[in-house]
Image (spheres, coloured by chain):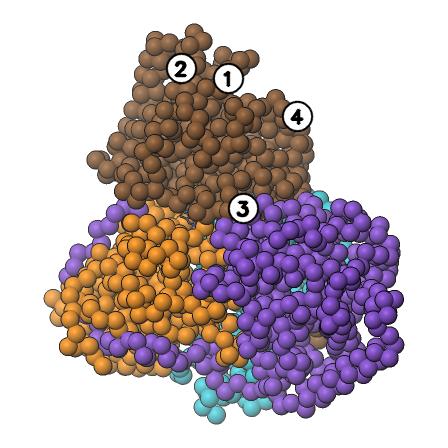
Chain colours: A orange, B cyan, C purple, D brown
Amino acid sequence: MHLTESVHRPLSYGKAINEALRQSMELCEDVIVLGQLVDYKSGVFGTTTGLADRFGPGRVQDFPNSENLMTATAMGAALAGLRPVVVHQRFDFMLYSLDAIANWLGLWYFKSAGKSDMPVTIRAIVGKGWGQGPQHSKSLHAWLAHLPGLRVAIPATADDAKGLLMDSVFSQTPAVFIEGRSLFPMTTNVPEKPYRVRFGQATIRRTGCDATIVAIGNMVPIALRAAAALERDGIQVEVVDPRTISPLDTATICASVAKTRRLLVTDPGWHSFGVAAEIVATVAEELGGELKAKPVRVCLPDSHTPMSATLEEQYYPEETALETAVRRMVRL
Amino acid sequence: MHLTESVHRPLSYGKAINEALRQSMELCEDVIVLGQLVDYKSGVFGTTTGLADRFGPGRVQDFPNSENLMTATAMGAALAGLRPVVVHQRFDFMLYSLDAIANWLGLWYFKSAGKSDMPVTIRAIVGKGWGQGPQHSKSLHAWLAHLPGLRVAIPATADDAKGLLMDSVFSQTPAVFIEGRSLFPMTTNVPEKPYRVRFGQATIRRTGCDATIVAIGNMVPIALRAAAALERDGIQVEVVDPRTISPLDTATICASVAKTRRLLVTDPGWHSFGVAAEIVATVAEELGGELKAKPVRVCLPDSHTPMSATLEEQYYPEETALETAVRRMVRL
Amino acid sequence: MNSSTVPPEPMGLELNHKTILGLGRYQALDIDGMQAETLAGLLRQMLRLRRTEEAILHEYHPADEIRCPVHFCIGQEAMPAALSLLVEAEDYLFSHHRTHGYYFAKGAPMREFFAEIYGRVTGANQGRAGSMDISHEASRFYGGAILSGSIGIAVGAAYALQHRHSRQISIAGFGEGATEEGAFWEAVNYAGLRRLPILFLCENNRYSVYSDQTKRQASDNICERVATFGVRARRIFGNDAALTHRTLQLEMEAMREGGGPALVEAYTYRWNSHVGPEDDSDNEYRTVEEIAFWRQNCPIRLLEEKLTAAGRFDSVRRENLESEIAAEIAENFKFAKSSPFPHIDDWRTANWNPASPLADRLLETLTESEFDQYQAEAKLAPY
Amino acid sequence: MNSSTVPPEPMGLELNHKTILGLGRYQALDIDGMQAETLAGLLRQMLRLRRTEEAILHEYHPADEIRCPVHFCIGQEAMPAALSLLVEAEDYLFSHHRTHGYYFAKGAPMREFFAEIYGRVTGANQGRAGSMDISHEASRFYGGAILSGSIGIAVGAAYALQHRHSRQISIAGFGEGATEEGAFWEAVNYAGLRRLPILFLCENNRYSVYSDQTKRQASDNICERVATFGVRARRIFGNDAALTHRTLQLEMEAMREGGGPALVEAYTYRWNSHVGPEDDSDNEYRTVEEIAFWRQNCPIRLLEEKLTAAGRFDSVRRENLESEIAAEIAENFKFAKSSPFPHIDDWRTANWNPASPLADRLLETLTESEFDQYQAEAKLAPY
Ligand SMILES: Cc1ncc(C[n+]2csc(CCOP(=O)(O)OP(=O)(O)O)c2C)c(N)n1
Ligand SMILES: Cc1ncc(C[n+]2csc(CCOP(=O)(O)OP(=O)(O)O)c2C)c(N)n1
Ligand SMILES: [Mg+2]
Ligand SMILES: [Mg+2]
């Protein structure tokens, strides 16, 4: 079903998350939300606003500053039949809970031999800009994608945010849901109904025949702006948004590159040993010598985040970096 | 200096680590060792045996089951002038300390603007075999390599183990030192003197012209056995051992592949989003269309570790997997 | 609940691993007022666990078919035995690496236990988990080998039970060593704050592998520390099965009535190596006297002698019990050894559940996704 | 050290955030026997911190040049002021996200502070760290924004100091919210076990962002909890700068003589939003009465009035002090604003120190590495 008849209206990314949570909680009383400050008016950047009033403190719970326990609590609650959504105001704060994630959550289903599910959704928000600095802006989504037994979404649009979050909440496999803070005010047309976007299905955000840009998370709008600029020079760029990095829709990516024969991957994570490497490697394994140019990664430099605004400008790649790289690939 | 005149003698990997620690502690009284059970006769698989007797409890300290604090303690001690070596009996136990590693240790130098060093060495031992199961055998070395500000060694031989460990202890940049438990009894000729093996310098373990195998950690002996088997069929394989994955000696790897035009990467970590992806991607970016065959990764399947011995056999790749893959690449 | 009904300190002692050694032969075991059935059950469960452990111990190296690390619990049978008589099928039980006692306490089947440690497909986890990580979903039993890690999950189960106003409880079993993990104190704080129905069972056997508790903690006072977090805590001589039973019973009944979280610290001792059937005494971490004390105060012997003296047990019953247990063990060994080994065809689906029945029922699927690339990016509030 | 010399509970109260509100105007500030220099220093440090914070607060949005999250400490000046008079240059001081007071307490330069929050290359960290993460190596001051994370590092510094039989101490400053992290309890346990020279300074301002302490912890009893881990702990009314000074002095002197670890919990209050100069009161988390109580008991006003009443302070001195501070702040603002912005040429070397002087001196280099591929792999002991 493609929801074509359903009502769509513009909604911001932040509000779409709020709507996904509200509808999930309406649809099923087992859905609960745990996180520091989720029950205040401002909520977590607005994404949890109104939930406590609507569903009561029993289902929307402020949590102590105990991130490791928060994940573990969600796991035990899931085991006992609830569907918890855990919220971290920053990805960085989630690092305290990596033991719970990597030593327990990811392997639970496997080691139970498929007898025991843990439908846990973990939301992690990635800070960017305004001097967040090295402890408030990391995105280690590549780490999570490396873990078996876990799904990882990194939506770029409001409609995907809602659909992927609802899919996480109502599926049996745990998922980490990575939100780019810089995307929160951006709007797209979002269906009113509850719906899912399935994990592992990339979307082509723009078609083109000269080069493929695979763009992750908040690099998607940047890639689209670069593509628009390049079109003015007659370069047709195809922009693929994987939407989830685990599972990763390698088929869609490879099909696009098979057509364009050129690949640029842009990821809002560190360059080395990141998601971009996996995508470049996969394409190299599939398409090997068929490429017309060497593949390129445009990511964050292998450096922690600097605070100063002038350094942030150097640090975060913008559309010009993508344009330059594509121009070089197509040798114009 | 190549230490050619110095006395070499066969030493096991485990004993070489023990010697590196002992010599480091002799050379400099700031070197201390922290870890659960480091001060008992059996030590940590023999690697810390004798140190407490020799250097006293002040420098060789049993630690509570508080892994996060253990790393933090090492950091503070390093800041105040010591050179701590932290020991984790299993890599898995280190996950409790990932906040300390990723939110503090790795970024300390950067955020101090180069004014403050933290010469901390963290040893993490990777279990393999005898039903270690999913909580005693993980190796997330790809995670560590993804972090800026941290060096990562994964030695395959006794002589490298000693030299890399001593380099870690006496350098200014923090390092994680990953030890394959299965390598502990293997011996190589190890110089008696204190020496260093520099990070970021791969070594060619065997030369060949038909294909390059880049082998990491305990995949090195397996790759060498595969190469020996392939030679009987007239296939000459070059085996490159990066020795450290951060920094990664991409020049040596690319030079080898430029010669052989075929690449297989074998890594004792999970297939996707791992070290092998980084190496394949780097080669694709450098050499692109020059390869004669599509690059191949032979890694652990994207699954947590099973306990049963029969499943372990399926799970851990052996030389036959490498041989088959190389044969397919050279189309024999 | 009146805490005075359980004498927390036998013979007026302030209980800890030092004072206990001064007890000599433990004399305080008291069976007055306990039902015959309970006492028989305690003895039976302890003996069954002991014989099972001994059988594995003897089989381990010679046969070389159990290929996973095994942490034996010989000497620590009282707690699991008491628990087995009190825990309900719908309660949740989580265990640390030393799983065997807890597995049996939860009533999970011996067949699947043996098959699991033998790595067979008929095992509780089809041979994927082994001794340290075994779980049995149908029995609501879950093990795991990272210290303190399962305690937080137990808190989560308690959260869900409270959320649903259930009378069931969640139980976490662990050693004194696990309390050094920060994860433990996060769990204790939250349990105390929310008054969750969680029972923390700490078997204090003095050592973490070879390391003495007071080498890792400022003092042997876990109960005192836990109590300040709003969690009821009491310590007992953990080799007294009758006392252990009475203590757990009181705590569990109170908890089912909304009495909030509690910790029971049971002082006990493992007879064997930390792991495996070898002897780890060449690490010189414990004295001959200490070992002798605890062997003398074997939980099975203490109860058996008391029952015998009271005329409630005799050699005939003992023989019947022994042969019944021996038969059960032999049969399950046979089952395990003759079971097939597992094979995994698809590692991916072994790690992920592809089904999503709830999502299928509740949600429609959106395939297209749109985007207006011309939006100016993000003007956000600054934090 | 005699704990009775410091009255821990003013007016016989059991101190916590509820009882404190009943105090009305705080009357117990006692300057008897304190040196004039100390009292003047306390007032000076508090006023300097207050004016600095106010200056940043007013400048923040209008100028829009300080582009990083800033956590103000207006209202919480007593602790940093007291600390500034007692801490030694060779001591180590670690702070949580609310760094400013601690930065100045350690005597780190105002120039580099302003330049840092303005993101300039002349800043303490060349603009890489900002308000939350600022550090000043030469002053042995280190901030950081992950709750409780720097406390463990402080423990490590204490470890090294003890190892070297130094009389220096290590100090960690944090809020009551940080004590919910397991990391904190690991640190407390280890400090108590090893009797490390570490001073834990907990400024209990009741809230973690908007969340009340008793919404996160079973009770407002951090001292009681910490004490059970073998760490001396006492709570004080933290807006009494004289009391704070006496308390820290006693603890720090004892610690330098090997007295072991201690925690001081200072009840205090932040006047502003959790972060930034906005008003966060629309989240309705604190009452008008509460805010009024704490403003009335402003630490500066309390001390100033006492000193004035005692004839030790007057409006002339006040004016001199104000204008001196105003000049200092103005000059440093100017310096910061006129400083150049940073640029990083090589991200890699910005993250790694390529030098290794000690290795260069002590070690020879081995380049070749050998391997015998014919060795049978690994026959290991099974665990
Ligand atoms: C996080 C972590 N650190 C270290 C270990 C290694 N380890 C396994 S069992 C054990 C001892 C635990 O002692 P205790 O909790 O008292 O339980 P006991 O073995 O005495 O029953 C240790 C240190 C582990 N499994 N997990
Ligand atoms: C691990 C972690 N979790 C969450 C946060 C977000 N956070 C920043 S400050 C803060 C409140 C801390 O309260 P407290 O420790 O009492 O210090 P205060 O701000 O009151 O001075 C929180 C939750 C964080 N920085 N680190
Ligand atoms: Mg123990
Ligand atoms: Mg606070």
Instruction: Tell me, for residue B330, which label it has, or none.
Output: none
Q: Residue at x 24, y 37 (%)?
A: D61
Left or right of D7? Residue B64 is right
**Dot 2 alpha-carbon crowd within 10 angstroms: few under 14, some 14 to 19, many 20 or more:** some
- Mark 2: amino acid: Glu
Labels 4, 3: one chain: yes
User: Would you name the residue on which mark 2 appears?
Assistant: D305
Labels 2, 1: one chain: yes
Find out whether the residues at labels 1 and 4 contact each other: C-beta distance under 8 Å. no
The one nearer the camera, C22 or B3, is C22
Please tell me whether mark 2 or mark 3 is closer to you in this view: 2
Q: Which chain letter matches label 2?
A: D
**Dot 1 alpha-carbon crowd within 10 angstroms: few under 14, some 14 to 19, many 20 or more:** few
- The location of residue B79, given as percent across then percent down, is 55, 42
Q: Residue at x 54, y 71 (%)?
A: C90
Distance between the alpha carbons at the discs numbered 2 and 3: 37 Å
**Dot 4 alpha-carbon crowd within 10 angstroms: few under 14, some 14 to 19, many 20 or more:** few
Q: Earlier in the sequence, mark 4 or mark 3?
A: 4
User: Would you name the residue on which mark 1 appears?
Assistant: D30
Distance between the alpha carbons at the discs numbered 3 and 1: 33 Å
- At mark 2, the secondary structure is helix
Labels 2, 3: one chain: yes
Q: Which chain letter matches label 4?
A: D
Distance between the alpha carbons at the discs numbered 2 and 1: 12 Å
Does residue D52 lie above or below C53 as drawn?
above
User: Would you name the residue on which mark 3 appears?
Assistant: D184
- At mark 1, the secondary structure is loop
Distance between the alpha carbons at the discs numbered 1 and 4: 20 Å
Q: Earlier in the sequence, mark 2 or mark 4?
A: 4
User: Would you name the residue on which mark 4 appears?
Assistant: D1
